[in-house]
Image (cartoon, rainbow, N blue to C red):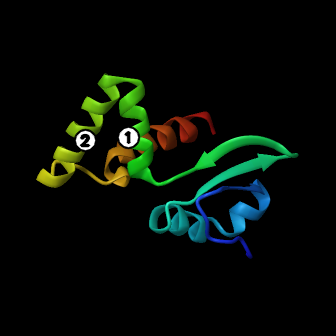
Amino acid sequence: MALRASHAVQRLPITKARVNLGQLARRAHVNKEYFILEKDGIPVIGILDAEELEDYLELRDARVGSAIRHSNADLKAGRVRPAVVLLKPARATRRARKSQRS
């Protein structure tokens, strides 16, 4: 993918972004680049560094800022669980329901 590093907003099709998502994520995080992904030429989503997104959300709604701070504190204190552990009971229930229907 031959996108130039700059602080300008880069626009590209979602199909191209899908193939290069890791590179786009790295560039957004390391180089603070912005990307707008388009579907059929229509802008549908943006990619930016997570810290910048948190700053933006915090400015829009103080409750979001509070939730972000609590989330970061939980992470630092080790009070988090991997998503796999959190989703395990729901997946087991879904499998049980599916087997009952069969």
Question: Could you say which is closer to the camera, residue 7 or residue 36?
Answer: 7
Q: Residue at image x 53%, y 61%?
A: 28
* Count of numbered labels shown in the rendering: 2
Dot 1 or dot 2, earlier in sequence? 1
Neighbour class for label 2 at 10 Å: few (<14), some, many (≥20)?
Answer: some
Q: Using the image, determine if residue 25 lies above or below residue 9.
A: below
> Looking at the image, which residue is at 57% across and 39% down?
98
What is the residue that sits farthest to the left in this orientation? 77
Measured from the top left, where is residue 74 in percent x and y?
18, 45
Few, some or many C-alpha atoms within 10 Å of disc 1 (few <14, some 14-19, many ≥20)? few
Write the residue at 29% across / 38% down.
Answer: 68
Q: Residue at x 53, y 52 (%)?
A: 48
Is label 2 in a helix, a strand or a loop?
Answer: helix
Q: Position of residue 18 (x, y in %)?
A: 70, 62
Q: On screen, 33 above or below 55?
A: below
Provide residue 56's location: percent of width, then percent of height.
43, 37
**Which residue is tagged 1?**
55
Residue type at mark 1: give it: Asp
Splitting the image into 4 quarters, where does residue 14 fall? bottom right
Which residue, as the protein is rendered here, is positioned at the far bottom? 2
Quarter containing the N terminus: bottom right
Q: Which mark is residue 71?
A: 2
